[in-house]
Amino acid sequence: MLHPDLSIRRPKMCKHSTPCPPADAIDHDAARVTASFPEQGWSLLCNGVIVFDDTGELMPDGSTVAPHRGPAPHKPVLAAA
Ligand SMILES: [Zn+2]
């Protein structure tokens, strides 16, 4: 029998000499990128977090974080007519 929840919660042990922050840490997006798919617009971090080009994030537990890019709007603001 497979136990998918075990592999989903902790995709792999962190092997970095300075361990990456876990997915539930405030600085989770400081983890190393283990796989990058720029053509698809996302990267997989060492702690299992998926980061999208728009800075949105998908956590290993399935929860999401809304894009949190700086002051510049991601989409063009409609100019007043
Ligand atoms: Zn790591």
Image (tube, helix red, strand yellow):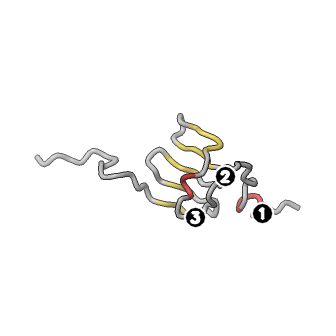
Q: Earlier in the sequence, mark 3 or mark 1?
A: 1
Q: Amino acid at mark 3?
A: Ala
At horizontal 65% and vertical 43% (from top left) the residue drawn is 34
Numbered disc 2: secondary structure:
loop
Q: Amino acid at mark 1?
A: Leu
Q: Which residue is mark 3?
A: 25
The reply to whether dot 3 and dot 1 touch (C-beta < 8 Å) is: no
How far is mark 1 from mark 2, CA to CA? 24 Å
**Label for residue 6?**
1
Q: Nearer the viewer, mark 3 or mark 1?
A: 3
Compared to 38, does 49 lie above or below? below
**Quadrant (top left/top right/bottom left/bottom right) for the N terminus:** bottom right
How far is mark 3 from mark 1, CA to CA? 19 Å
Q: Earlier in the sequence, mark 2 or mark 3?
A: 2
**Label for residue 18?**
2
**Residue 57 in the figure: left or right of residue 34:** left
- State the residue in front, 77 or 44: 44
Residue 63 place in picture, x, y as percent? 56, 64
Residue 21 place in picture, x, y as percent? 62, 58
Q: Nearer the viewer, mark 1 or mark 2?
A: 2
Q: Amino acid at mark 2?
A: Thr
